[in-house]
Amino acid sequence: MTVVFIVLTLLVAILLIGVVLIQKSKGGGLSSAFAGSNQIMGVRRTNNFIEKVTWILAGAIALLSVLCTFTMPDAITTRTRVQSTATEQTTGGNYDTQAPAAQTPAQAPAAQTPAAPAPAAGK
């Protein structure tokens, strides 16, 4: 299915290239070839038609690209060409230590009075 979408995208891209090449910059292009008033589409309609075809083909390329992405086989695989080096695992210390038991108010140390300020040195 992906191949079908790729082929359709290429065909639409070739058509879009052709439509863009038909156009001339500054609005000339194919409409200048139909300068006569007895033409079927007329000058204004030719520009509108080519512009609509350009937008439709550009939208078709965008749509086909998204569809191609969804139908692609798994391009991302777990295989890699880069060989990984073996990592050395070290064992850590014993981190399963117990937290100290909570102290009850009866076991709390007695409040100490603040010490007297130390004399200033150098006097």
Image (cartoon, rainbow, N blue to C red):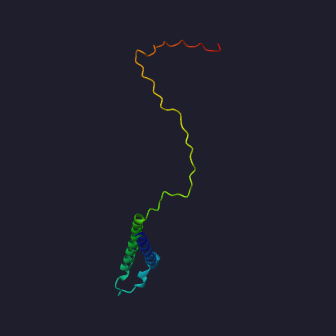
Q: Quarter of the image holding residue 70? A: bottom left
Q: Where is residue 97 in the image (x, y as percent from the top left)?
A: 48, 29
State the quadrant of the N terminus: bottom left
- Which residue lies at the image location 51% right of the left edge and 32% below the top edge? 94
Above or below, comparing residue 74 to residue 93 in the picture? below
**Front residue (pair 49, 64):** 64
- What is the x, y in percent for residue 101? 43, 23
Q: In which quarter of the image is residue 29?
A: bottom left
Residue 96, above or below 59: above
Q: Residue 32: percent from the left, percent from the top?
A: 43, 82
State the count of labels: 0
Quadrant where the C terminus is found in the figure: top right
Q: In this view, does 55 lie above or below 90?
A: below
**Which is nearer the eye, 102 or 10?**
102
Q: Position of residue 40 (x, y in %)?
A: 34, 85
Q: In this view, does 40 lie above or below 83?
A: below
Residue shown at 55% from the left, 58% from the top: 81
Q: Is residue 72 left or right of residue 83?
A: left
Horizontal side of 92 relative to 68 (left or right) equals: right
- The answer to whether residue 28 is left or right of residue 118 is left
Quadrant position of residue 14: bottom left
